[in-house]
Amino acid sequence: MALVKCTECSKEISDQAAVCPSCGAPNKNRVKPMNGFLKALLVVGGLFILFLMFGAYEGSKPENREKQHDRDAIELCRSRISNPSLDPEAQRFVSRTCDYMVDQFRAKYGVEP
């Protein structure tokens, strides 16, 4: 809350006063307080923006990009196991390769892919 000069009588009045208490002139410099809904909306919007910024930051780290690349490779490998054009021996080979990739992922990152 600050003091401003009345535009009519030049006396100092609150910036939140609707009218000057001395002369009754409307306060053209009035600062209206925000209502509760607007404050809540600003807080939620700010938190959402921070969440997006954090996600963008985390996603841009080289180690996270590499981890996602490894996950994508495992998913692609798993999608090839059920390829009907592969003979049973090739399917077993792809399956073992996928298992090996999963084991390597666990060893490298300490989590499931």
Image: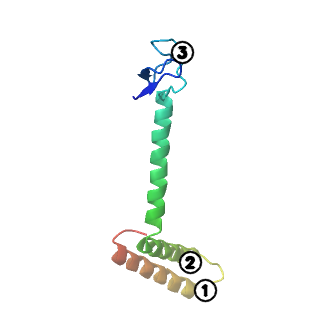
The residue tagged with tag 1: helix, strand or loop?
loop
Q: Toward which corner of the image does residue 21 lie, by quadrant?
A: top left
Compared to 16, does 93 lie above or below? Answer: below
Q: Nearer the viewer, residue 42 or 94?
A: 42
For the residues labelled 2 and 1, the Cα–Cα distance comes to: 10 Å
Q: Nearer the viewer, mark 3 or mark 2?
A: 3
Compared to 74, does 7 lie above or below? Answer: above
For the residues labelled 3 and 2, the Cα–Cα distance comes to: 82 Å
Query: Where is residue 107 drawn, in percent x and y?
Result: 34, 77
For the residues bearing labels 1 and 3, Cβ distance under 8 angstroms: no
User: Reading the chain from its start, which is encountered first: label 2 or label 1?
Assistant: 2
The answer to whether residue 15 is visible is no
Q: Nearer the viewer, mark 1 or mark 3?
A: 3
Q: What residue is pinned by disc 3?
A: 25
Q: Nearer the viewer, residue 2 or 66?
A: 2
Query: Where is residue 1 drawn, in percent x and y?
Result: 39, 28
Residue 87 circle label: 1
Q: Residue at x 39, y 80 (%)?
A: 104
Query: Where is residue 5 drawn, in percent x and y?
Result: 46, 25
Q: Is residue 33 left or right of residue 83?
A: left
**Amino acid under disc 1:** Asp
